[in-house]
Amino acid sequence: MNKQNNINIAVEVDANKVPEKITWNSTDLDGSRNAKAMLLSLWDSKEMNTMNIDLWTKDMSVEEMSKFFFQTYITMVETFEKATNEDQMAMAMRDFAEFFGEKMKVIQPTGKFDK
């Protein structure tokens, strides 16, 4: 018998529909969690297209957004590599993530991109 899990996302917005608070919970999680940003991508196999929901709260700082994107890039690389076994492309994607992380001061410079 298959088990079904549900993920629920609630977004509180101001009068201009700008997100002020994002909370989420899951059937496998006790209680709910707060978030300042989310990127949700769903693959529509019928339309052969990606549907996206990208939200962030107005109190999210540039530093937090930079770290969020850096960590998301790394996660995307790992997922892509695991799903496709495209090691060379994954390496190139990791290089970009590292470049991004250095330029946005999320990680320490390695000197690899000083050219």
Image (cartoon, rainbow, N blue to C red):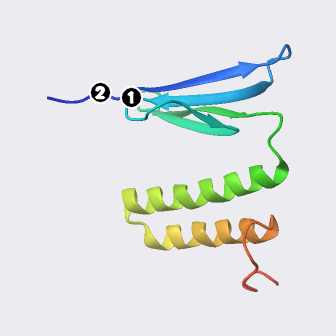
Q: Quadrant of residue 95?
A: bottom right
Compared to residue 110, the image places residue 25 above or below, namely: above
Which-is-in-front pick, marks 1 and 2?
1
Kindly state the secondary structure of the residue where label 1 is placed: loop
* Residue at x 68% of width, y 39% of height: 37
Amino acid type at circle 2 is: Gln
Residue at far front of view: 30
In this rendering, would 94 be left or right of 63? left
- The residue where tag 1 is placed is 27
Q: Residue 58: x, y in percent?
A: 83, 34
* Residue at x 76% of width, y 55% of height: 66
Nearer the N terminus, badge 1 or badge 2?
2
Kindly state the secondary structure of the residue where label 2 is placed: loop
- Asked if the residues shown at circle 1 and circle 2 are in contact, with their CB atoms under 8 angstroms apart, the answer is yes
Compared to residue 100, the image places residue 51 above or below, namely: above
Q: Residue 67: x, y in percent?
A: 71, 57
Q: Residue 25: x, y in percent?
A: 50, 30
Q: Quadrant of the C terminus?
A: bottom right
In this rendering, would 14 be left or right of 89? right
- The residue where tag 2 is placed is 4
